Each structure stands twice: as structure tokens, then as C-alpha cells.
Image (cartoon, rainbow, N blue to C red):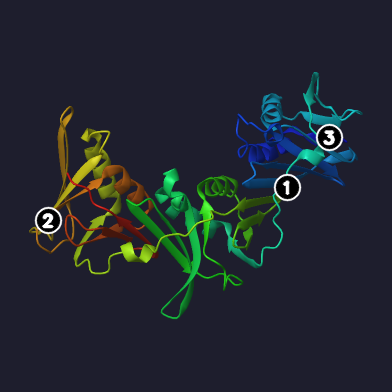
Amino acid sequence: MKISIERAALLRSLAHVQSVVERRNAIPILSNVLIEASGATLRLNTTDMDISIVEGTEAAVAVAGATTTPVHTLHDIVRKLPDGAQVELALEDDGGRLALRAGRSSFRLSCLPREDFPALEGEGLPHEFAMSAADLRTVIERTRFAISTEETRYYLNGIYWHAKEENGVQLLRAVATDGHRLARLEMPLPEGAAGMPGVIVPRKTVNELHRLIAEAEASVQIGLSENKIRFSFGDIELTSKLIDGTFPDYERVIPVGNDRAMTVATKLFREAVDRVSTISTEKSRAVKLMLGPGPSGGGLTLQATSPDAGSATEELEVAYADESMEIGFNARYLLDIATQIEGEELKFELADSGSPTVIRDLADEASLYVLMPMRV
């Protein structure tokens, strides 16, 4: 194998594929990137046995071939090369070393046989459909903050995707919850997604996908089965195993009888919670919301106290016409949700101080959030 490629192109591809590889790996081959050169294309492939990323990039291929070499070492070398450098990669005759040359720099990297590299097959994915990169980013950003990090309830460690019919309309729903909060987003079901199974896309896959599509503009082709999912866009293909578990019946925890409504300006509320929570204890992050009708339509007082730091209060004008009540929330969770609200106003639907609260973006009917209260 012998190729020549511009440093920026190689660095971009290596940056995309190297992040799934753990820095410390008990299995040496999983620390490596599979490099395949043929035609006018260089293909890079990494895997941790749960996720696989493949990316192709244009290169001048003098001799076709394939090998594997430590991906983080290769990435660090290319990252430190000067801008505009032309990188030459050549596999030595015995296949045990990969020679890298750029200008006056020269490196010899250890290799493992291409045959030892494990394949995460993405074949046999019967359900295929397309989504715009913008829609996929929205799905991820509006839900991933609520993914659980508690490994014992592994079935909550991802986003649950499923088809749902609501009032005769076919929808694609994405739901994430950690037991304290829930985020749900829905959109029209893409063509070809009818009949798709409900699947749980793992947190690591979600984060890798979000990073990869950050600047993508084209549509993303999605293929899935009951245990695997594949995302293809541009020259990148990400294949992942799905979480093998049953997502809980989330609809049971979304209250439908909350009859007290409060509407508040999103930006003012977010900033007030952020300020007041500065004083709250690091352990509980508790903020109390005290609501009552007022002369201008309603009043909200935010309050936080800490035995060590003192206390803080802030008042906001809100639209609220029901009986006075107090309810406490984790400030971090409140801010996570408020950050997702793009509309100028958000709406709280409350029942009492001990029941879950629904939070909605008045400018976006597709998203819904549920937050459990806490004692303050």
C-alpha cells in the first residue's frame, strides 16, 4: 500500500473516526484504525465492537492495500504536522510497519494484520428512511440531556425511537428519561419508517452522531433492524448496536390533568434561575418556585437557600391566575429544559407541589418536557 494525501483531509477523517476508540484498550486491535486504499479513495474504519465509523476521502493511491495502525498515535502525528503538508503513507514489505513521511518528518508505526480487524456488520437492515441533518440534530439536542447515566437501568441509557399514531397522524417520536425528567420530541414519520420497531439508540452513539452531523447539510440515510442502526451521510457511515432492553411506558408518567398554568418569558426565566441557583447547595441544586396571582396577572418568586452561602430571591412577572402554590425543582434540570426552549415563552402545567410538571415551548408543539419536583 502506498498513498499520498493532503494533511487537512487526512486530519479531518482521523478526527471523525478516532473518538470512538478508547485511549486504553485491553484488545490491541481495537486501538487501531483500519486503513484501506483502492482506486482514488482512502477509507478509515474504527470500532469499539458496539459502534463502527467508516469514512472515505480522496487520495492519490499509487499501490492499493490495507493495514491497521494505532489511531490515536496517527491522529496526534498528523495533527502536529504543518498546514499544507503532503502526507505519504507506505506499508513496508513485511507488513509490520507503516511509514509516514511529510516534508522532513518521518515515522514508522507498528501495524496489525487487516484480517484481525473486527467487522461490525450493518447488513440486513430492513427499515430504511431519510431525515434531514437539521431534523436529526433537533431530535438529538432536544432529548439527549435527559438520557440516564445510571448503568443499572441500562435501558434508559439512550434515546427511544418509535413510530406512533396520534389523531390519525403517523409520527416519529424520540423520548429520553432518567427518572427525574423526561424529554419527548415528535415529527411526521419519514417515508419508509412505517412499521419500524421501537429502538433504543445508545448514549455514546447519540453523542458521536451529534458530533459528526454538526456541520452536515445533506440528508441522512437511516437503516435499522431490531438490534442495529446505521446512519449514512456524505462519505461517513456510522453503524451501532442498539440497547437490548424494553423502554418503560413513558406515557404513564406524562400527566394529563395538570390544571394550573403559568406562562413566563423564556430568557428572563432562564437567567433568573441561573442567578438564584448560584447560592443553592452543590448537592441538591434546589430552587423553590413560589407562585401567586398578582395585580399584573401573576407573580413568581424564585428562592434558593444554603446553610453555607446564604439565600437568594428573584421576582418575575408571569401569567398565572390560579391559587398560590410552592414547588421545588433541581435548578440544573430546570436550566437544561429551559435551554431547549426556542420560543419567547414557556408554559408550566402544574398540579401540586408533589406531582410531575409538564413544561412546553409555546412556539413548538412538537416538544414536551416532564420534570419531577423535589422537596425544598
Extreme residue in the bottom direction? 168
What residue is disc 2 on?
325
Front-lying residue, 129 or 134: 129
User: Would you say residue 225 is visible in this rendering?
Assistant: yes
In the rendered structure, the answer to whether residue 357 lies left or right of residue 18 reads left
Residue 204, position as x, y percentages in the image: 54, 45
Question: Is disc 2 in contact with disc 3, using a CB cutoff of under 8 Å?
Answer: no
Quadrant location, the C terminus: top left
Query: SS for tag 2?
Result: strand
**Kind of residue at badge 2:** Met
Residue 340, position as x, y percentages in the image: 38, 52
Front-lying residue, 242 or 33: 242
Q: CA distance from mark 1 to mark 3?
A: 26 Å
What residue is rendered at 45% in x and 44% in y? 151
Q: In terms of image quadrants, where is residue 296?
A: bottom left
Query: SS for tag 1?
Result: loop
**Kind of residue at badge 1:** Ala
Residue 104, position as x, y percentages in the image: 81, 18
In the rendered structure, the answer to whether residue 216 lies left or right of residue 116 reads left
What residue is rendered at 69% in x and 53% in y? 234
Extreme residue in the left direction? 295
| Label whose residue precedes the other's in the sequence (2 or 3) | 3
What residue is disc 1 on?
119
What residue is disc 3 on?
4
Q: CA distance from mark 2 to mark 3?
A: 69 Å
Query: SS for tag 3?
Result: strand
Q: Nearer the viewer, mark 2 or mark 3?
A: 2
User: Would you say residue 364 is visible in this rendering?
Assistant: no
What residue is rendered at 13% in x and 58% in y? 298
Q: CA distance from mark 1 to mark 2?
A: 58 Å
